[in-house]
Amino acid sequence: MGLMDFIKKQFIDILQWTEQGDGVLAWRYPMADLEIQYGGSLTVRESQMAVFVNEGKVADVFGPGLYKLTTQTLPVLTYLKNWDKLFESPFKSDVYFFSTRQQVDQRWGTQQPVTIRDKDFGAVRLRAFGNYAYRIADPKKFHTEISGTRDTYTVADLDGQLRGLMLQHISDAVAASGVAFLDLAANQIEFAKQIQAATAPAFDAIGLKLEMVTVQNVSLPEELQKILDQKIGMGMVGGDMGKFMQYQTAQSMPEFAKGAGGGGGVVGDAMGLGAGVALGQVMAQQLQGGLQGAAAGGVKPADVMATLEKLGELKAKGVLTEEEFAAKKAELLKKLG
């Protein structure tokens, strides 16, 4: 090998990064003992940014484009090195490339139930999971706070920390959404928006931008799921208390039939079914009769009080809202007077 060939190998004329595969966020150009040729070229492709680091300090940041490396294109580095305008020698600097495209289909989810505050139930526990997407928005901040001097920094290296940030702000998102806990499952889009708004500042603090959040599922505790099912059933019968009692009885008929049938079988099922229907009709007639009797004017105070007690039980279980209970109560008391 001749002297000129040896000298030629000591200088880098072209700096560029061709991403190989997915998942790399930051990549350090392999400098070894090489120096960058003054007047050499730097190629930064779309969805990339490059950062020059000199003696541990970030000197310059370059967005997409083709650059000729001179004292004019490296003004901060020029200042750090005390170069004058005539300086045209090779220089030593670390160069990091960053991928700024979206990192999509990142998963978040609660491994254990998360306790949150709720205006209706006080403290409740929920499970939820979904996806999110982010990108590097500030490579200087990301280099300083996260990737540092590592040769390569990947999506997998960051996954645990970002997943923790998502879960950390779920409670804040629920509080900010103003959506009642029982309605979260039906308002997943709004819930996702609030998670993004609550978590975005934490991403920004490390140089990232949280582009999108989705909520694919919200799981309610079993006891609250039962109350939600009751509210759905109430909506199905249009608020008619008699029909709702029939609906509740119909939901419990399979278990009732098992008990009534003794050993089971077709006869037992039929007996249970008949008893269940009869019970539902009696309960519905009692409750509806109290309301109709009040409407007719022939009101007995005992009947009104019994009806109010039943309505109070439904309110305590979450089937009736405070407003619905108050309206029924006012209606009965008006007829009584």
Image (tube, rainbow, N blue to C red):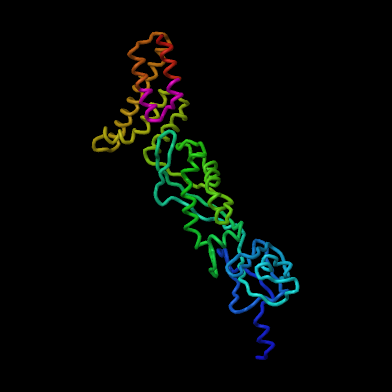
Image check: 143 left or right of 185?
A: right
Q: Is residue 58 above or below residue 106?
A: below
Magenta segment includes 314 = yes
Q: Most prominent secondary structure in the magenta stretch? A: helix
Q: Quadrant of residue 292?
A: top left
Image check: 100 left or right of 307?
A: right
Task: Looking at this view, name the residue that lies furthest to the right.
Answer: 86
Task: Looking at this view, name the residue that lies furthest to the bottom.
Answer: 2
Which image quarter holds the C terminus?
top left
Magenta segment includes 330 = no
Where residue 274 appears, as percent x and y from the top left, is 32, 28
Q: Is residue 192 above or below residue 54?
A: above
Q: Quadrant of residue 125?
A: top left
| Residue ID at (35%, 27%) | 277
Q: Is residue 127 above or below residue 251?
A: below
- Is 145 or 315 nearer to us in this picture? 145
Magenta residues span 310-326
Where residue 210 appears, as percent x and y from the top left, is 57, 52
